[in-house]
Image: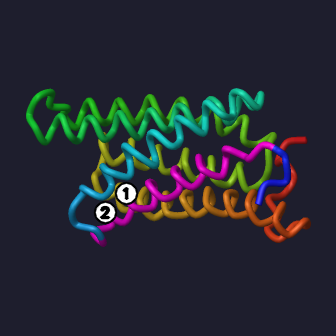
Amino acid sequence: MSNGTQGNPAVVGLAGFGLTTLMLQFHNLGLVPEIGAVVALGLVFGGAAQLIAGLQEKSMGNNFGYCAFTSYGAFWISLCLIWILNKTGLFVTNDNEIGWFLVAWTLFSIILWVGSLKISKAMAFTFTTLVIGFILLDISKFVDHKFAFYAAIDLVFCALGAWYMMAAAILNPLYGRTILPVGKPVLA
């Protein structure tokens, strides 16, 4: 089904980010009581697949995709390793450390959010919901755990935003026209 052009690695990166984020929120909302599936997805699809997609974005000259996919791939692998290390008791990470881990990722995500405003409305939506989700998680760790529920709801929309962009990147070229518009950049 190749047309002789190079494939778009973003479709795999967005798929991995979206699916893993969605499954974690299903867990956080109590729909999936155990975290095993999230850990497996986080290591393989959210982690390794995103890292690979990011490295492919590098070879295509896309610094934004390179940074985003490799970084969030590393985020998922790191988070899964924290859960595994906590479960085994080898290196236990407390709530305060997790809170600061999330704050650091919030600050990092704000940088990419600014960049997303120059890409498309769909990208801006996805990164806006991601930053809001991280901020709500930060508040849940340092102020009130009840904010984790609101973070989970917000991050479901973030995951769906990533999947929307993935679907647009797959369907629009296949149909040779815009089936799913992503919108012009918020900042021209």
- Work out whether residue 171 or residue 2 is closer to the camera in this orientation and state it: 2
Asked if residue 23 lies in the magenta stretch, the reply is yes
- Give the amino acid at mark 2: His
Classify residue 28 as left or right of residue 71: left
The answer for how far apart the CA atoms under marks 1 and 2 are is: 5 Å
Tell me what residue is drawn at x 61 percent, y 56 percent.
Answer: 162
Name the chief secondary structure element in magenta.
Answer: helix
Q: Where 14 falls versus 138 (above or below)? A: below
Residue 58: x %, y % from top left: 69, 28
Region in magenta: 6-31
Tell me what residue is drawn at x 55 percent, y 44 percent.
Answer: 131
Tell me what residue is drawn at x 46 percent, y 44 percent.
Answer: 134
Label 2 secondary element: helix
Residue 167: x %, y % from top left: 69, 64
Classify residue 8 as left or right of residue 148: right
Q: What residue did someone put label 1 on?
A: 24
Q: Quadrant of the C terminus?
A: top right
Q: Where 72 falls versus 171 (above or below)? A: above
The image's colour scheme reads: rainbow
- Give the amino acid at mark 1: Leu
Asked if residue 186 lies in the magenta stretch, the reply is no
Which of the 4 quarters of the picture holds residue 160? Answer: bottom right
Label 1 secondary element: helix
Local packing at callout 2 (Cα closer than 10 Å; few below 14, some 14-19, many 20+) is some
Which of the 4 quarters of the picture holds residue 116? Answer: top right
Instruction: Confirm or deny contact between disc 1 and disc 2 (CB under 8 A).
Output: yes
Residue 133: x %, y % from top left: 48, 50
Residue 10: x %, y % from top left: 67, 46
Q: What residue did someone put label 2 on?
A: 27
Q: Where 32 falls versus 35 (above or below)? A: below
Local packing at callout 1 (Cα closer than 10 Å; few below 14, some 14-19, many 20+) is many
Classify residue 38 as left or right of residue 185: left
